[in-house]
Image (cartoon, grey):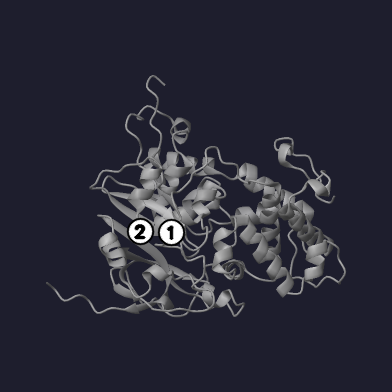
Amino acid sequence: MNGGQDLGGMHGFGPVAPEADEPRFHAPWEKRVFGLAMAMGFTGTWNLDASRAAREALPPGEYLTSSYYAIWFKALARQVEAHGLATADELASGTVSTPALPVKRVLRGEAVARLFAGGFPSDRPVATPARFAPGERVRARRINPAGHTRLPRYVRGQVGTVEAVHGSFVFPDTNANLAGEAPQWLYTVRFAGRDLWGDAAEAGHAVSVNAFESYLDPVDPEPAA
Amino acid sequence: MAHDHDHADHDHDHDHSHPASELSPMELRVRALESVLVEKGYVDPAALDALIETYETKVGPHNGARVVARAWVDPAFRAHLMADATAAMRELGIGGRGGEHMVVVANTPEEHNLVVCTLCSCYPWPVLGLPPVWYKSPPYRSRAVIEPRAVLAEFGVTLPADQRIRVWDSTAELRYMVLPMRPAGTEGLDEAALAALVTRDAMIGTGLPRTPERNA
């Protein structure tokens, strides 16, 4: 979606502000939100793409003025409520008044180290060969889905060059809706800074994104000069 | 309280025993959420403690620094790292959530690499830990792709004008780590001493490795 999360190329946010000796968390509640988001994700009621979609669904004004873990908290509470795992009254009061729903699995403390050191890979096999090869020129499609997508606005409609084919991965745009993993080939596509930003581009600047196959159209080779 | 526990290293900010009236509205709302999720059996309090402990104290840039130092001293490891970073890092016992599909990009005199996630906060957790606030915040996410040299200048990094800048926007589940160039004057240093020169920012691309102190 064209939401508050799609920030590439925007102006006006001011300087980057690194913090010396920054702690991992800035308040006790941030730790709890982090842990809760990880643990609830593990229940399999939703997936990582759905969680990103829930965060992006905050109105842009709210997204841009909320701290990072506040965004996580708001999205998590919405997901819990939307899936019927708890009611708004329960979340407001902290008091349980409705029965629990069954969930697929629960993350146990003793399993955390093993599971998180192993990770949760998102590569999946596909039956079809990759459509594009390194060196090919491609155009990022002009898509504007109201739902989740991982093609940022600043590359849509722009022509770049395929640099790498990474294998096939879960497609976020469907997975976020719990509509299936529908894996696709994933590419690194490199864009010249000048093609993205025109005269504003710094010299010798290039940007690449990881783009799923359905984000891309072929471009006829440039005629030889 | 179900998640009462004793973390001597950070009990200064562990205020679960304070009366509710002293807590911020966010603290109260998060507590309510946690209470409900635990009581309903969706969340094991021991899992929360293990997750927080892991990502607050165990996983961090020291992991990435080990990878970089090994790549500086071991050409075969470096070749493996560039070809299949996930597998090469596994050789060092490094991997997991947020780094299932690692890619390492190496700086050269011709090209400097910079990693960003314009859409959220994708960051290679197993090698760098959880990202700093600036990495997740709008100024960096908006500007890294359009004016990386200006962003680098704010980090105190000025690159030669003829060194190209390559920005990697982490828009899928690949996670990027920058392999910085080994600083000059480090020929005599062992792997541990080299790792101590590798900063978090050097592995994001917003910094360069430290240079060894003279006479060290």
Relative image position of residue A174 (x, y in whole percent) = 55, 78
How many marks on residues?
Answer: 2
Residue sitting nearer the eye, A66 or B68: A66
Amino acid type at image mark 1: Ser
The chain identifier of the residue carrying mark 2 reads B
Task: For the residues labelled 2 and 1, say whether their Cβ atoms are less than 8 Å apart.
Answer: yes
Of all residues shown, which one is farthest toward the left?
Answer: A225
Q: Marks 2 and 1, how far apart in space?
A: 8 Å
Q: What element carries label 2?
A: loop
Residue B147 in view (yes/no) = yes
The correct choice, above or below, for A122 with respect to A220 in the image is: above
Q: Name the residue under label 2.
A: B146
Q: Which chain carries label 1?
A: B
Q: Which residue is at 52% across, 41% downward?
A: A19
Disc number for residue A33: none
Name the residue: 31% across, 64% down.
A197
Q: Where residue B142 appears, x then y in whole percent?
A: 43, 59
A175 or B131, which lies in front?
Answer: B131
Q: In which quarter of the image is the C terminus of chain B?
A: top left
**Residue at the disc numbered 1:** B142
Q: Which residue is drawn at 74% across and 66% down?
A: A105
10 Å crowding of disc 1: few (<14), some (14-19), many (20+): many
In the picture provided, is A64 more to the left or to the right than A166?
right
Residue B50 position in % (x across, y down): 71, 49
Residue A210 on image: x %, y %: 42, 66
Callout 2 amino acid = Ile
Left or right position of A180 against B170: right
Can residue A110 be spotted in the picture?
no
| Side of B198 relative to A140 (left or right) | right
Does B34 appear above or below A60? above
Residue A178 sits above or below residue B210 on the image? below
